[in-house]
Image (cartoon, rainbow, N blue to C red):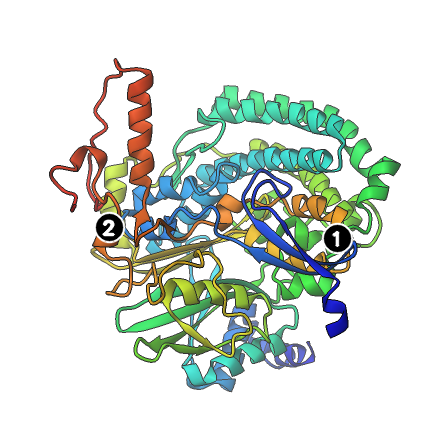
Amino acid sequence: MTDDNVIMEKVEVKEPTKEDLVAEAIKNRFPSAEVEIKENKWGKRRVWVRVPREDYKALMKFIVELDPEAHYSIGIEQDYGEELGYMSHILINYEEAPGVSLLVEVRAPKDDPVIPDISDVFPIAVQYEREAAEMMGIVFEGIPDSRRLFLPDDFPEGIYPLRLDEKGISEEAVKNAGHPYYIKGGAKK
Amino acid sequence: MTEKVEYWVKVPIGPIHPGLEEPEKFILTLDGERIINVDVKLGYNLRGIQWIAYRRNYVQMMYLVERICGICSFSHNHTYSRAVEEAAGIEVPERAEYIRAIVGELERLHSHLLNLGVVGHDIGYDTVLHLTWLAREKVMDVLEAISGNRVNYSMVTIGGVRRDIDEKGKRLILDLIKYYRSIMPQIEEVFLHDPTIEARLRDAAVVSRRIAKEYGAVGPTARGSGLKVDARWSEGLGVYPDLGVKPVLPQDVTGEKPHGDVYDRTAVRIGEIHQSLELLEHALDQMPDGKIKAFPKDNVLVAKLKIMVDGEGVGRYEAPRGELVHYVRGKKGSDKPLRWKAREPTFPNLFAIAKGLVGNQVADVVVAIASIDPCLSCTDRVAVVQGGKKIVLTEKDLLKASIEKTRELNPDVKGDPTPIGFGCAR
C-alpha cells in the first residue's frame, strides 16, 4: 500500500488516471513488458500487459506489491498457432470505483510450453492453471496440484481438447459429426 | 500425524444432489465430525461449450452462451455481448443500456429469491422455501411478459437489446416493485430476526476476508466476507453509476461487522433484493426514449462484426452469483471468434467455500454449499464427454434424440429441422 501512495503523490500534478499510474509503474519496473491502455466505447479503460516468460512471475509479485488486495479473476489459455498463451485478468485498486482492470499475458512456444506457476502469489490461480494444462497442454512449472480438473481421469493422455492443431480433437474422434439429417451427405463413418 | 491418519475418513458428498440439484463432488476428509480437508471434483456437467464455440459465428454464439445456464442466462448473454462490443468498438444506445439494467435486476431478484429458498430448504425449513418461491413466481411472470420466456430471455443482442419495454411492461414492473416491498418484510423477518435461523447460520462455514481475497471469491460470497467487490460498481458499467449502484456489505443489512458466514451471505442477498428494487425504480424513472439497437437486423450485424471485430475484448458484469468475465478474441475477416472463454462466479467461490469449510462440522456442508448459490452448469462449461473408445459426444446426439422423441410423441409435426444459414461447420 505504501508504494502505491508514493507513486500517486509523485505524479499527481498531471492528474493521470489510476490506469495510467499502474501502466507507468509496470513500465518503469519491467522495460521488457509491452504495456497498452485501451478504452472502450463506454469509457472503461483496461491495461493490457504482455510480458516475456522470464519476467512473468516477478511482474505478478509486483502487482501484489502495488495493491495487496489484488483480485485474480480469470486465467485464459489460448492457441496462437506457433505459441500458447496464458492471460490473467486482475482487478486492482478497487477500494474506490472504478477499479483498474489489468490483463497480463505470457506466451510460450509450442515445443517448450512451460510457464511459471503463480499460485504462491494468487492461490486461486492453481485452478485456472489446472484447466489450462488439461485443455491446452501448457506445462506450469512448480504447480502444487497437477491433477485434472474437468476432464475425466480416463481421458487419453496427450490430447488437449481446445488445441487447434493435431493434438486437439480430431475429426474421427467426434461421434456423429454430421447433423442427424445430413448423415448421408456430410458425416464420416 | 501419521498415527492420526488411520482415523481419518474420506466421505464423498455428491456428485448427485450435494445441496442443490446439480452435479459436483466434494471429497471430505473427516476426523470424527470435524472436516480436515475438502477436495472439489468437477466435470460432471461438461458439454464442450468452448469446443462448440470454435464452430459458431458471433451471432450464433449469443444463443450458445445464453444456454450455459438457465438461471443467469441474461448475465451470460449480456457479458458476452459486452466483450464483443469492446472488441468491435460498438456503441450501445442509451435506452438499450437501461433495458439491460432492468432485465439484469429482474434476473437478480429471481436468482436471489431462489437461493434464499434453497438455503431454507437445506436447513429443513421448508415453509421458507414455499414462501420465497411463491414470491419468486411474480418476477418470473414479469420476465415472461417482458421477454417472452421464463428462462433464456434472449433480450440482449450485440449492440443493444432485442425487445423494448413498453408502457405495459413498465406498469408490470412498478406493480412488481410494490408487491416485493410488501412481501419482503416477511422474508426478512425469517432470515434476519428468527433466532432458530440465526443459531443455525451464524458462524457456519466462515470464509474469512483473507481466504475470500486469496481465492478470488466474488459476489455475495466475497461481500459477505467484507470484500468490497461488485463488477457493476468497480467497472462503472453502462448506466449503473447513474443509477447509484454500490456494493452491499453485511453491515448495511445486519448492522454488525462482517463475519463471513452463511448468515452474512444471506443478509447480503436480502440487501441486494432491496437494492435491485431501488435500481429498477430509478431505471424506469430515468429511461430515455430512443432506439434500442445499433444494427437493425441480424444479417447486418453478422456482416458488420466480420469487419469490425479486430482484437480482444473483455466483458465484466455482476451476475447474481458474482463477477462474470467473458473474453473474446477475433480477427478482421472472420465471422467467428478465434477464442472465447467465460469465467463463472461459482468457479472461485467453490474453492473459497471448500477452504472455508475446513474445521467445520459435517452437518454444515450442505447449507454451506447452498450458501454460495452454486451453479455447476455454469462452471462445467468446457470439454468433452468420453465413451468407451476415443469418442466425443456432441450436442448433435442430443438434438437427434430430441427430434426422435418429438416425432415419437407427435408424428404429425411439421417443419424441417435441417439447419439453415452459415458459419457453423457441422
Given the image, on which type of amino acid does mark 2 rest?
Answer: Asp
Left or right, B275 with reference to A105: right
Left or right, A4 with reference to B44: right
Rendered position, B397 above or below B213 = above
CA gap, disc 2 and disc 1: 47 Å
Question: Which is more foreground, mark 2 or mark 1?
Answer: 1
Figure quadrant of residue B176: top right
Q: Position of residue B6 (x, y in %)?
A: 73, 66
Left or right, B322 with reference to A32: right
Rendered position, B198 above or below A56 = above
Residue at the location (41% across, 52% down)?
A: B382
Figure quadrant of residue B120: top right
Question: Where residue B335 is drawn, which disc sits there?
Answer: 2
Disc 1 is attached to a residue of which chain? B
Q: Which residue is disc 1 drawn over? A: B205
Question: Where residue A122 is drawn, which disc sits there?
Answer: none
Q: Position of residue A32 (x, y in %)?
A: 42, 85
Residue at the location (31% across, 42% down)?
A: B59
User: Which circle's residue, 2 or 1, is located before the other in the chain?
Assistant: 1
Q: Is residue B234 visible?
A: no
Residue farthest right in this picture: B195
Q: Is residue B155 visible?
A: yes
CB within 8 Å, label 2 to label 1: no
Disc 2 is attached to a residue of which chain? B
Given the image, on which type of amino acid does mark 1 rest?
Answer: Ala
In which quadrant is the N terminus of chain B drawn? Answer: bottom right
